[in-house]
Image (cartoon, helix red, strand yellow):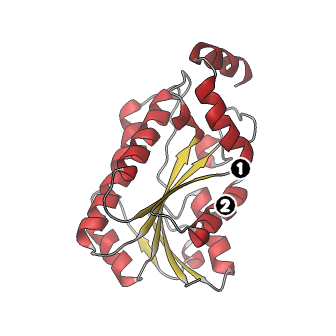
Amino acid sequence: MSNKNICLIGGSSDLGIEVAKICKMRSDTDVHGIARSEDKIRKLYKEFLLISDYELDKEAISDFIIKTKTTDIVLLNGFIGENNRPAEKIVRINYSIPLSLIKHINKKIDDKFTFTIISTLAVSRPRDKNYVYGLSKYLLEEAVKKSKFGKFIIFRSGFIRTKMTEDHKEPPFGKNPEEVAEKIVNAILNNRKRISTVYSSIPIFLLFYAFKLVPLNILNSIERRLI
């Protein structure tokens, strides 16, 4: 297995920090970070790029990826919102920004990166409580599946206990970011496909397909009672 140069876009997120910690402990990975904040995290990364905006700074991001000889890019952009609002922000952060970055990097750099996108159990069905979030992640999944360039890992997770989710009621099978981070790193190191889908746990895999079978009105009713 060859060494990996992993770049985390959104490296100051709770999940990004845990991925960086795991990579830093391994002899077969170097980890670089890109984020809008560097408070207490710069030391986690071999090299670090501080930016102000993920879209406006696309050129600086691609230059940094070239400089660090990155092999694997993890896009950690994510925003749930509250009761599907504000819809524009949810779609922009979960779909527009990561897809724009993927397209720009592929166009600027003639190389075959592996992009890991963080998806969600919510892509299985557009349920009442989070249909904008789920559909935005679904659109991103479909866009990368149709891409003709690069390799992709679609990492589908359930609820992760982070600052982003602290105001949301926790459903069953929630995990701490360090547990999910370990799964992400393993998926990167063991990936052999051009497009692969990885689940954060067996229960999330089973729930994903169970949600497709349960009638939507019943599913919404169960979630209203439990969450």
Q: CA distance from mark 2 to mark 1?
A: 9 Å
Q: Residue at x 75, y 35 (%)?
A: 172
Q: Earlier in the sequence, mark 2 or mark 1?
A: 2
Task: Classify 57 as above or below 22.
Answer: above
Residue 71 position, x and y percent, is 45, 76
- The residue to which callout 1 is attached is 201
From the image, which quarter does the C terminus lie in? top right
- The residue to which callout 2 is attached is 183
Residue 205 position, x and y percent, is 66, 43
Query: Callout 2: few (<14), some (14-19), or many (20+) C-alpha neighbours within 10 Å?
Result: some
Identify the amino acid type marked 2: Lys
Q: Residue at x 36, y 83 (%)?
A: 67
Q: Residue 40's image quarter?
A: bottom right
Q: Residue at x 62, y 37 (%)?
A: 208
SS for tag 1? loop
Residue 43 position, x and y percent, is 58, 78
Query: Callout 1: few (<14), some (14-19), or many (20+) C-alpha neighbours within 10 Å?
Result: some
From the image, which quarter does the N terminus lie in? bottom right
Task: Classify 34 as above or below 160.
Answer: below
Residue 226 seen: yes
Residue 36 seen: no
Q: Are marks 2 and 1 in contact (CB under 8 Å)?
A: yes
Q: Residue 85's image quarter?
A: top left
Task: Classify 147 as above or below 190.
Answer: above
Q: Say which of 49 and 175 sits in front.
A: 175
Q: Say which of 48 and 115 sits in front.
A: 115
SS for tag 2? helix
Task: Classify 110 as above or below 91.
Answer: below
Identify the amino acid type marked 1: Ser
Left or right of 183, for residue 63? left
